[in-house]
């Protein structure tokens, strides 16, 4: 005979847990929506300021809705060779840096997965030391100068072509690939490069996409290396350095006049439009890599 009272209590408790779980999910979703809303408010403000009139910007009348709607700032940016060339150079530089960095990271991570690699522990230690200790700004500048990289676009590529953190992430992902696959390929006569290109690379698309996004964001947002090492050759200035200079100088009426703006308000509008041009392209890349990004971060950190 079934105890109906006991069964009813279990159903009530199960229903209560289900309701509590749903209520918790609703609270979490609301909190996430609130955080997302707070995060996009600055972007909305910048976008609105970029399409507002200069007079409204000077009078601080613009918040989250355009005042005196105009596309003049975008027209100025798109028709100015300084901005378009800088944006094109930054895009080309980002693609180049991502390719070089992925090659360097792969070539550093793959040999460190071999247990029989001579001096493996010593090499790991040397690589990790560079992650925690740096020479400093002045010694680095002197080294760059001795290498003849000052006023050279290669200074934007070579010094930052390898991130130890990203290398560790890729190495951890390589550890997760079954060793039996490599052993089978070696029995068939495949060398290390064939194993890397035919087995490890095809199976590592998630972590490769993740690191590509890391490198792309880092290069796209970087400007300090150009600020330190490239002074006279402005054609090698990335868009972020151009924006940095504009942000620092846009409040000056004298500088605004020299740049061709009638008022500081016009410079403010150009600044907002430039921010949008510098931000939107990298934001558009993320949705295409989101699937690989999530799986790459989670799987790559499972095993050290």
Image (cartoon, rainbow, N blue to C red):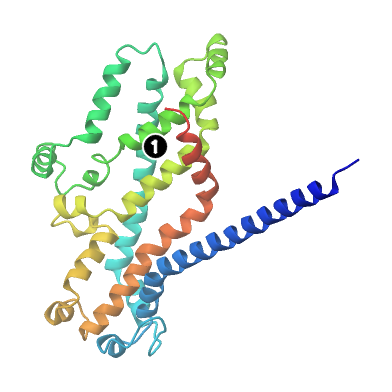
Q: Residue at x 30, y 72 (%)?
A: 80
The answer to whether any part of residue 144 appears in the image is: yes
Q: Nearer the viewer, residue 144 or 232?
A: 144
In this rendering, the answer to whether 164 lies above or below 3 is: above
Q: Residue at x 62, y 55 (%)?
A: 21
Q: Quadrant of the rendered structure where residue 187 is?
A: top right
Question: Where the N terminus falls, by quadrant?
Answer: top right
The answer to whether any part of residue 93 appears in the image is: no
Q: Secondary structure at mark 1?
A: helix
The image position of residue 289, as x and y in percent, is 51, 49
The image position of residue 209, as x and y in percent, is 47, 42
Question: Where the C terminus falls, by quadrant?
Answer: top left
The image position of residue 202, as x and y in percent, is 54, 32
Residue denoted by label 1: 102
Q: Is residue 101 left or right of residue 180?
A: left
- Number of dots carrying numbers: 1
Q: Nearer the viewer, residue 180 or 284?
A: 180
Q: Is residue 169 left or right of residue 121?
A: right
Q: Residue at x 27, y 41 (%)?
A: 160
Q: Nearer the viewer, residue 122 or 272?
A: 122
How packed is label 1: few (under 14 Cα within 10 Å), some, or many (20 or more)? many
In this rendering, the answer to whether 222 lies above or below 183 is: below
Q: Residue at x 30, y 39 (%)?
A: 161
In this rendering, the answer to whether 170 lies above or below 257 is: above
Q: Is residue 238 left or right of residue 113?
A: left
Q: Nearer the viewer, residue 39 or 208?
A: 39
The image position of residue 121, as x and y in percent, is 30, 17
């Amino acid at each position: 005979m079934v105890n109906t009272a006991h069964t009813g209590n279990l159903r009530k408790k199960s229903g209560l847990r289900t309701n509590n779980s749903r209520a918790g999910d609703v609270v979490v979703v609301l909190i996430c929506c609130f955080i997302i809303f707070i995060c996009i408010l600055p972007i909305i403000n910048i976008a609105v300021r970029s399409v507002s009139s200069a007079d409204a910007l000077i009078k601080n009348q613009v918040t989250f809705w355009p005042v005196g709607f105009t596309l003049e700032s975008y027209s100025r940016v798109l028709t100015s060779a300084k901005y378009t060339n800088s944006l094109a150079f930054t895009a080309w530089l980002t693609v180049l840096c991502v390719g070089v960095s992925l090659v360097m990271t792969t070539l550093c991570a793959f040999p460190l997965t071999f247990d029989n690699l001579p001096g493996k522990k010593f090499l790991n230690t040397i690589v990790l030391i560079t992650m925690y200790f740096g020479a400093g700004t002045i010694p680095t500048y002197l080294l760059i100068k001795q290498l003849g990289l000052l006023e050279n676009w290669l200074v934007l590529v070579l010094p930052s072509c390898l991130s130890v953190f990203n290398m560790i992430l890729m190495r951890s992902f390589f550890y997760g690939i079954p060793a039996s696959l490599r052993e089978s390929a070696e029995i068939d006569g495949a060398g290390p490069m064939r194993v890397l290109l035919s087995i490890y690379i095809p199976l590592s698309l998630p972590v490769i996409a993740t690191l590509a996004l890391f490198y792309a964001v880092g290069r796209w947002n970087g400007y300090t290396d150009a600020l330190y090492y490239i002074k006279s050759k402005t054609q090698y200035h990335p868009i972020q350095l151009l924006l940095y200079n504009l942000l620092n100088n846009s409040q000056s009426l004298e500088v605004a006049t020299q740049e061709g703006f009638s008022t500081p308000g016009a410079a403010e509008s150009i600044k907002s439009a430039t921010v949008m041009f510098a931000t939107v392209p990298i934001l558009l890349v993320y949705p295409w890599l989101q699937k690989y990004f999530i799986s790459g971060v989670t799987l790559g950190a499972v095993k050290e």
